[in-house]
Image: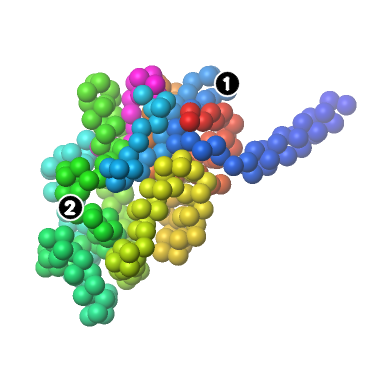
Amino acid sequence: MKYRIHFFFLVFSLILNHVIAQEKLAHSLLWKVTDPQTQRYVYIFGTIHMIPESDFFWPQQLDTAIKQSGKIVFEIDMNEIADPNKIFELMPLLMMRNDTSLADLLSVDEMKVISDHFEKLGLPMILISKFKPLFLSVMASDGISGDALQSGNYKSYELVLQNLADSLEKETGGLETINFQVSLFDAIPYKKQAKMLLDAIQQSNSGSDSMLAKLAKDYRSQNLEEMAEAAEKDPGTAEFLELLLYSRNRNWIPLIRKHMEEKVCLIAVGAGHLGGPNGILRLLQKESYILTPMN
C-alpha cells in the first residue's frame, strides 16, 4: 500500500510541476527566492543596463530588499568596470581579430550608413572601425552617444545600485568576470555582428521604435514573459540565445544557491535572464525554491 501511495505522490508531483511550469510569471521585476528547507532567501531583481531617463522608475519594494541585503551581486562586479587598469587591459579584447575591420564585412553603401551614424555621434570610423560590432551596437539607437550616461539622458540600474551600495557601505560582487562577457563577442561571427549593427541603425533611422525603446516599454510593464518571448522572436539574436542567455542562466543557479547560504543578497541581473522556461526563475522553481513576486 505504501508503495502505491509513493507512486501516486510522485505522479502528482510531476503533474504539479508541469502545471507550475506552464503558469505565467506575475508582472514583477523583483522576486524573493526562498529555500523551503532552511528558510534562507535572496532577492532577485531584473535590471535594464541602459534606459532613457524618462523611462527610469524604482519598484516600491526595492528599497526594502536593499536594506535587508548584506551584499549586492551583479552579473559582473561593478568595481571591475570602475578600475581604469582593467579597462585598459580589456581594450585589445574589444577589437576584432586578424586586423578585421567593418569595411571587410559590409558593402560600401552599408558602410556609409554606419559611418554617417557614428560621425553624428562624434566618432569617426578611423577610431572605431576595428571594434567588434556587438560592442558598437549599444550606440546603434538614435540619441545614444558615448556620454549618454554622463549627460543624464540615459540611466543604468547597475550604476544606481552600485552607488547605493557604496553609500550604504554594502559589499558587492559578480556572477561572472568582465573577461568572460567580452569573450562572448567572439562566439558570434563578425559578419553576423556587423549585420545586426546595420539593422539596428537602419531601424533607428526609419523612425520606428528602436530596439532599446521597445525594451524599455516592456520593462516598464514588468512583463518578464513578454520580454523572454520577444528575445525568442528577434531574428537577430534568437539563434544565439543558448550562448547569450540560457547556458549562463544554468551556470548562475549554483552561484545563487551559494550566495543564499552565506547571507541575504540582492542579485541584480538583466531582466532578460529572468523570464521564460529557460530563465533563472523557472530554473530555481524546478529546484523547489519558492518564488514570491515583490511587485
Way the structure is coloured: rainbow
Numbered range of the magenta stretch: 64-78
Left or right: 226, with 271 as reference point? right
Q: Which residue of the protein is positioned furthest toward the bottom in this rendering?
A: 108
Q: Are marks 1 and 2 in contact (CB under 8 Å)?
A: no
Give coordinates of residue 139: x percent, y percent.
24, 57
Q: In which quarter of the image is residue 99?
A: bottom left
Residue at 22% of width from left, 46% of height from top? 153
Query: Which residue lies under the disc numbered 1?
Result: 37
The kind of residue tagged 2 is Gly
69 in magenta: yes
- Residue 131 is inside the magenta segment: no
Rate crowding at label 1 as few (under 14), some (14 to 19) or many (20 or more) other CA atoms within 10 Å: few
Say which amino acid is labelled 1. Answer: Gln
Give the vertical position of 146 relative to 150 (above or below): below
Quarter where residue 144 is shown: bottom left
- Is disc 2 placed on a helix, strand or loop? loop
Q: Can residue 248 be seen in this view?
A: no
Q: Position of residue 19 (x, y in %)?
A: 68, 40
x%, y% of residue 49? 32, 44
In the rendered structure, the answer to whether residue 222 lies left or right of residue 199 reads: right
Which of 41 and 251 lies nearest the eye of the viewer?
41
Could you say which is closer to the camera, residue 254 or residue 69?
A: 69
* Residue sitting at x 13%, y 49%: 88
Kindly identify which residue carries mark 2.
Answer: 146
Q: Number of numbered discs present?
A: 2
